[in-house]
Amino acid sequence: MLTCAPARAGHPIETQRALADYVVDLWDAGEDCRHRLWAVREIYAEPDL
């Protein structure tokens, strides 16, 4: 839960399609991290009184 999906390693981008794929992969990795961070926050959140 404390590790995120890896972002794709940078490499030369030669086409618009390759750039779009890279951006989508980056977005997915970030979304994975945001989701995992939210789950950790929920575990450690203080209960509402």
Image (cartoon, rainbow, N blue to C red):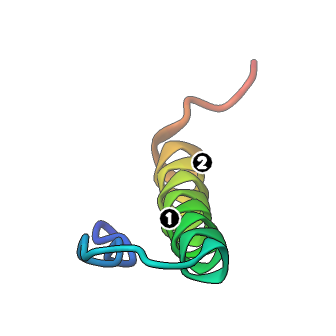
**How far across and how far down the image is residue 4, in percent?**
36, 70
- Name the residue type under label 2: Glu
Residue 35 falls left or right of residue 2? right
x%, y% of residue 21? Answer: 61, 79
Q: Residue 46 occupies which quadrant of the picture?
A: top right
Tell me how far mark 1 sits from mark 2, CA to CA.
25 Å
SS at badge 1: helix
Vertical order, 32 against 34 (above or below): below
Q: Quadrant of residue 18?
A: bottom right
Q: Which sits in the foreground, 37 or 33?
A: 33
Check disc 2: other Cα within 10 Å, few if <14, some if 14-19, many if 20+.
Answer: few
Question: What x and y, as percent, mark residue 31?
Answer: 61, 60
Given residues 38 and 15, the one toward you in this image is 15
Direction right: furthest residue: 49
Q: In the rendered view, tell whether residue 2 sits above or below residue 6.
A: above
Displayed quadrant of residue 16: bottom right
Query: In which quadrant will I find the N terminus?
Result: bottom left
Left or right placement of residue 26 versus residue 16 in this view:
left
Label 1: few (<14), some (14–19) or many (≥20) C-alpha neighbours in 10 Å: some
Which of the two labelled residues, at mark 1 and mark 2, occupies the earlier sequence position? Answer: 1
Q: Residue furthest top?
A: 49
Which residue position is annotated with label 2?
A: 42
- Residue 7, placed above or below residue 21: above
Q: How many marks?
A: 2
Q: Residue at x 58, y 64 (%)?
A: 23
Residue 14 — which label? none
Of circles 1 and 2, which is in front? 1
- Position of residue 47 in the picture relative to residue 9 (left or right): right
Element on which disc 2 rests: helix
For badge 1, the amino acid type reads: Leu
Quarter in which the C terminus is drawn: top right
Q: Which mark is residue 26?
A: 1
